[in-house]
Image (cartoon, rainbow, N blue to C red):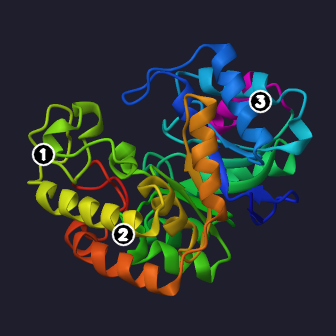
Amino acid sequence: MRYTKIKGIEREVSRIAFGCMSTVPSQIYAGLGDDDAVATMRRAFDLGINFFDTARAYADGESERQLGLAVKDIRDEVVIASKPKAGDLSEGEILSECEHSLRDLGTDRIDLYQIHWPKRQVPLEETARALEKLVAQGKVVSIGVCNFGPLDLDEWLGHAACSTDQVAYNILFRGCEFGVTERCEKHGMGILCYSPLGQGLLAGRYDTADSVPSGKARTRHFRGDRPEARHGQPGLEAETFETIRAIAEIAGRLDIPMGDLALAWLLHQPAVTAVLVGASRPDQVERNARAAELDLSAETLAELETTTVNLKEKLGPSIDMWQAPPRTR
């Protein structure tokens, strides 16, 4: 495993992080019982993964509770990132949400506390003030945001410091490259990448757009008339699967699983600190962890750029993979 730094956090973090949404029920995961969830997270730790990302919204705190069980005897050896529920983000709500998270996690501090989505019900200044209060109280070590576009980041950074922006980012969805990457580099922030395998598209699970279940066919890659889609756009199904086939061909020539190649590609991108991977079994963690050790040549990176740039340009600069108009700026 390879490690790097997040601004404000003393312990180095693994470049592969464990996304704890994968152990509780959701639109895309069946969820695990406590024993299986703990076993999967502990296998991640044994493989060198010391960075765990969760949220209050994941099964109403169940994800945080499971993570607390998994790391209770190794708390000082891991870095925990969490998020308040995306309500109005008022000061009172942020402070209350943090207390709930600390209780469910069984810890006295959250290493990285992240705003889940930008909201407009209260001024960002109030939200920032609440997070800074938690830092001053020692309940939060460092502040991050999630799903903040370039203009959202500009506004936030006018009020408070920020260590990371967690965004949907994979080789099939590169909206953050239209401004987020530049700002993160400028301000010493790291990008945390969620949905790095495109909800299974880059793991080679699906041969055609029609074979993708509706819960995973909600993104702007797919037609807007899909049952659970919320974007109302035509989608880019033909272009998406043409790109997937081209990536698979490159992976085959390199004798690398396509999923490993996709994760390694992200780790070679500017400003990327860590890639969040979910797992519902220990062997899945083992497969994902090995991607941290892959070094891609300049020639391979250039070929992947040529292969995916058309899809990147057609999807455009929005970092909201699911909705249009986007919830971000």
> Of the residues tagged 3 and 2, which is closer to the observer?
2
Q: Are the residues at dot 1 and dot 2 in contact (C-beta closer than 8 Å)?
A: no
* Residue sitting at x 12%, y 53%: 233
Q: Which mark is residue 250?
A: 2
Q: Amino acid at mark 3?
A: Leu
Residue 326 lies, in percent from the top left, at 29, 55
Give above or below for 49 relative to 160: above
Residue found at x 29% / y 75%: 307
Q: Which residue is mark 3?
A: 102
Marks 1/2: CA distance? Answer: 30 Å
At numbered mark 1, what does the secondary structure look like: helix, strand or loop? loop
Residue beneath disc 1: 224
Where residue 285 sits, quadrant-wise, is top right
306 to the left or right of 17: left
Q: Who comes first in sequence, dot 3 or dot 1?
A: 3
Question: From where the camera sits, is residue 83 visible?
Answer: no
Residue 248 horizontal side relative to residue 294, left or right = left
What residue lies at 33% left-to-right and 65% top-to-bottom?
Answer: 247
**Kind of residue sitting beneath label 2:** Ile
Real-space CA distance between mark 3 and mark 2, rounded to the nearest whole angstrom: 45 Å
What are the residue bounds of the magenta stretch? Answer: 91-107
User: Main SS of the magenta segment?
Assistant: helix
Describe the element under mark 2 as helix, strand or loop. helix
Q: Secondary structure at mark 3?
A: helix
Residue 45, horizontal then vertical, whole percent: 77, 40
Left or right: where 59 falls relative to 229:
right
| Label 1 crowd bin: few (<14), some (14–19), many (20+), radius 10 Å | many
